[in-house]
Amino acid sequence: MTNPSAPAVHENGTGIPLVLLHAFPLSARMWAAQLERLPGAAGETCRVIAPDQRGFGSVPLGADEPSLDLVADDLARLLDDGGVERAVVGGLSMGGYVAMAFARRHGDRLAGLLLADTKATVDTDRARANRERIARAVEARMSVQLLADERIEEGLLGPATDPALTARVRAMIAEAPPSAVAWAQRAMAARGDSLEVLAGVRVPAAVIVGEADTVTPLTEARMMAEALPDAELTVIPAVGHLSSLEAPETFDAAVRDLLKRVRG
């Protein structure tokens, strides 16, 4: 259940703003390690901003029709409220979809772009049908247990993942409100192709992917890296879809490299 007293935005550090957008169906709490370690890493500073996306964490879902464009616009307003003109915007999985929507709608506000374990291509008909199946199931049962079971079984984490991390991820999934899960599934199903958007990005970019990611595999990561004019691709060995949780040190190193490139 959502904790109404939890913050909608987790933030730490000063310096260049770095926005981290969480995966589906987690919350900003997945970025705990990055919030702690990235701001002062290697003597370089950044302001890590990890918001909960609408419907997740403590953020209300609202009555709008499902659309990731709305989530991107939510981020623009959040940056306005925080006095941030431009930021390095990054996301993992669904967070990456939102980051690409932000690049399309608010590209002038990008200082850099980070895309982790995500893809720029649209869902197949089969994938869209599966998203609708899950949306209807969680609405009917008012429970996300089915989703937690399926996400773990379908390879959300790498085969050698510590059982403690698996339990932690399962617990985070269990906290997701069914209404938000259904809304986000439909929003992701409706998203368009973003390869053309990436081709127009004129800031440094980084693409990160777990070598064992079967949800958004390496082929998709390479496609994004090739579309971006100035991108570096990092492949993390023996890691699945949630690379920032499974291999935080390697993930953070790639983020630091991106921040160095942004600083010039």
Image (spheres, rainbow, N blue to C red):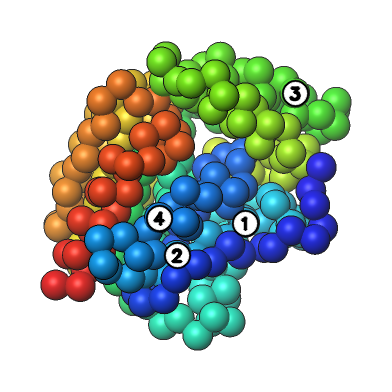
Instruction: Check if mark 4's residue and mark 1's residue have beta carbons within 8 Å.
Output: no
Q: Which amino acid type is shown beneath numbered disc 2?
A: Val
Instruction: Check if mark 3's residue and mark 4's residue have beta carbons within 8 Å.
Output: no
In-image side of 12 versus 234 (left or right): right
Q: Name the residue under label 4.
A: 37
Instruction: Check if mark 4's residue and mark 2's residue have beta carbons within 8 Å.
Output: no
Residue 141 locus on image (x, y percent): 85, 26
| Separation (CA) of disc 2 from disc 3 | 31 Å
Q: Name the residue under label 3.
A: 145
Q: Which amino acid type is shown beneath numbered disc 1?
A: Asp
Instruction: Check if mark 3's residue and mark 1's residue have beta carbons within 8 Å.
Output: no
| Separation (CA) of disc 3 from disc 4 | 32 Å
Q: Badge 3: few (under 14), some or many (20 or more) residues near its Cα, within 10 Å? A: some
Q: Name the residue under label 1.
A: 52
In this rendering, the answer to whether 230 lies above or below 193 is below
Q: Is residue 60 visible?
A: yes
Q: Earlier in the sequence, mark 4 or mark 1?
A: 4
Q: Earlier in the sequence, mark 3 or mark 4?
A: 4
Which corner quadrant of the image does residue 230 belong to?
Answer: bottom left
Instruction: Check if mark 2's residue and mark 3's residue have beta carbons within 8 Å.
Output: no
Question: Secondary structure beneath disc 2?
Answer: strand
Which of the image's four quarters has the C terminus?
A: bottom left
| Separation (CA) of disc 4 from disc 2 | 10 Å
Residue 11 locus on image (x, y percent): 54, 66
Figure label count: 4
Q: Which amino acid type is shown beneath numbered disc 3?
A: Gln
Q: Which amino acid type is shown beneath numbered disc 4?
A: Arg
Q: Name the residue under label 2.
A: 48
Residue name at image x 38 percent, y 41 percent: 248
Question: Secondary structure beneath disc 1?
Answer: loop
Return the residue found at the far bottom.
83
Residue 49 locus on image (x, y percent): 49, 65
